[in-house]
Image: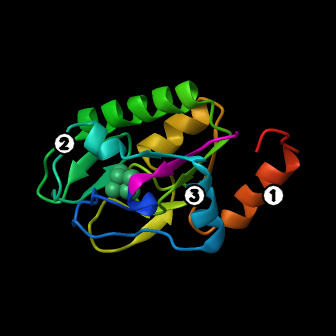
Amino acid sequence: MKKILVSTCLYGGEPVRYDGKSKALEAPVFLKWKEEGRLIPICPEVFGGLPVPRVDAQRQGDRVVTRDGTDVTAEYSAGACEAVRLAAEGGVVCALLKEKSPSCGSTYIYDGRFDGTLTEGEGLTAELLRKAGIEVFSENQLDKISRLIEDLQETDI
Ligand code: SF4
């Protein structure tokens, strides 16, 4: 079966977000993938050793910095590396990651000024996965993932 790497906060279960809230997806196609065992949940920020809840952070160029000014680039980078390792180990066909996150955002992220402004860009994990050749989609692109899986014309699903 072709697997999909997914942000744990979209997958559901134990809270992992900075604010301790859930963003679990309930779209029928997503629940079907979950039921099939097609999803591999990952939370790069927890992998990097950060607690739940935690101070929110944003990308500032190649760095990731919390609202109170702490540089957490090392933790975010470590989590991104672990996500890439798990993607390779699981042989995933793509990743479905939470938009706007400094780790998982794939189209838009906050611009680093902590005033709610979004800018085009990607989180560290999305960036590293793409560099590793893995397609990354957001929760707004479930249709694209469906088409990708259909196009693979699997025989083992
Ligand atoms: S790092 Fe990714 S999976 Fe973890 S809480 Fe943030 S958006 Fe969700």
Residue assigned mark 3: 35
Residue assigned mark 2: 71
Q: Is residue 95 magenta?
A: no
Decide if residue 80 is on the left or right side of residue 20: right
Q: Residue at x 50, y 35 (%)?
A: 128
Between the C-alphas of marks 1 and 3, the distance is 19 Å
Say which of marks 2 and 3 sits in front.
3
Magenta region: which residues? Answer: 1-8
In this picture, is 132 found above or below 66? above
Q: Is residue 2 magenta?
A: yes
- Provide the secondary structure element on which disc 1 rests: helix
Residue assigned mark 1: 147
Instruction: First in sequence, mark 2 or 3: give its number.
Output: 3
Say which of marks 2 and 1 sits in front.
1
Q: Residue at x 66, y 67 (%)?
A: 29
Q: Quadrant of ligand 1?
A: bottom left
Between the C-alphas of marks 2 and 3, the distance is 38 Å
Q: Quadrant of the N terminus?
A: top right
